[in-house]
Image (cartoon, helix red, strand yellow):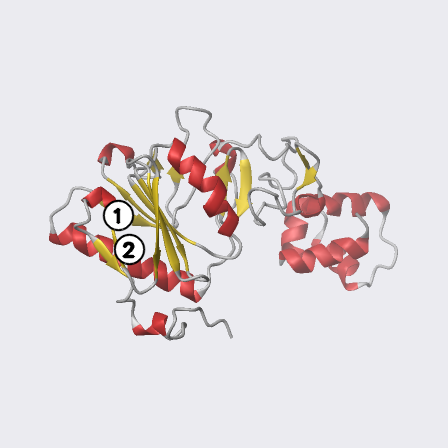
Amino acid sequence: MNLSEMKKAKKEMGLSCETIAARTKVPLSTVQKIFSGVTKRPREDTLRQLSTVFIRYDHIIQKPGGMRIGEPAVDYGKSLAQEPAFEPGSSEPFRRQGTYTVEDYYRVPDDRRVELIDGVFYDMSAPNAVHQHMVGFIFNQIYNYIQSNNGDCIPFCAPTDVRLDIFKDDKTMVQPDVFVICDEEKVNYHNVTEGPDFIVEVLSPSTRRTDMIKKLQKYADADVREYWIVDPQNAKITVYDFENDCDMKVYRFGEKVPVAIYDGKLVIDFDAVPKYIKKMYNDNWELITN
């Protein structure tokens, strides 16, 4: 990795000279002179030492089948993490996507949100306003229903870790947008273990295919009873009732959607979304993105 590439990576990663100096043990004054251009020809061993802080940015790891991290995944979407979980300078060797575990997940810096699915890290980009408003709208209706009926189930919303496959291979940790747990033994201080009873994912451009394909199968395998995919872009809700032969129904925004795990007594009324969400749509419930 040459100096020009390191300068670009420094800017894109938002690293300060102080951070680079601390991580590489290169004197701060030397780092500042190199990246400011004062030092025209840095020593090769110094550049090599500096490059270690950018390994996660620059390192190309091959996924089985030859796909590079950072290229769109044919089946899983466009949100594959572009760097391994380990910090620069770690003695751990870089590993292929598909081999990471929950232990590696807990080593990812707190300021970076990712999901781990079958040993593969997926970046979670910041959700847009439509996404967050819709998550809050759905969560509030579920929460209010459970509270008013003195229910035993517990509602959650992201970012809460759900540790799937805990008895299988311990290689999956996800953060569903909204979910409900009816077995309190699955809940601990740090996360939720095993599959929730009910899950809602609100699609975003970066998570669309992962939610619709990869997570659909993972949730079915984890004995999730019901899975909703809310699609703001196309103004529809796809409901998978895994308890009833994976019965699938599609609803449009503006309709009332019954929650199967509550025998339809809980209904999410998508015609009652708050006015600040409706302002983002036209009369036909088509999303206005301008």
- In the image, 80 versus 258, the foreground residue is 258
Q: Amino acid at mark 2?
A: Phe
State the residue in front, 174 or 290: 290
* Label 2 SS: helix
Q: Which residue is mark 2?
A: 139
Q: Disc 1 or 2, which lies upstream in sequence?
A: 2
| 20 lies above or below 33 | above
Between residues 190 and 75, which one lies in front from this camera angle?
75
Residue at the far top: name it. 168
79 lies left or right of 232: right
Residue 254 drawn at (x, y percent): 31, 65
Residue identifier under label 1: 155
Name the residue rendered at 43%, 69% in the picture: 286
Q: Position of residue 70 (x, y in %)?
A: 65, 47
How packed mark 1 is, by other alpha carbons closer than 10 Å (few <14, some 14-19, many 20 or more), is many
201, 152: nearer the viewer: 201
- Where's residue 287, x and y in %? 44, 69
Question: How far, Cα to Cα, is label 1 from label 2?
Answer: 7 Å
Q: Secondary structure at mark 1?
A: strand
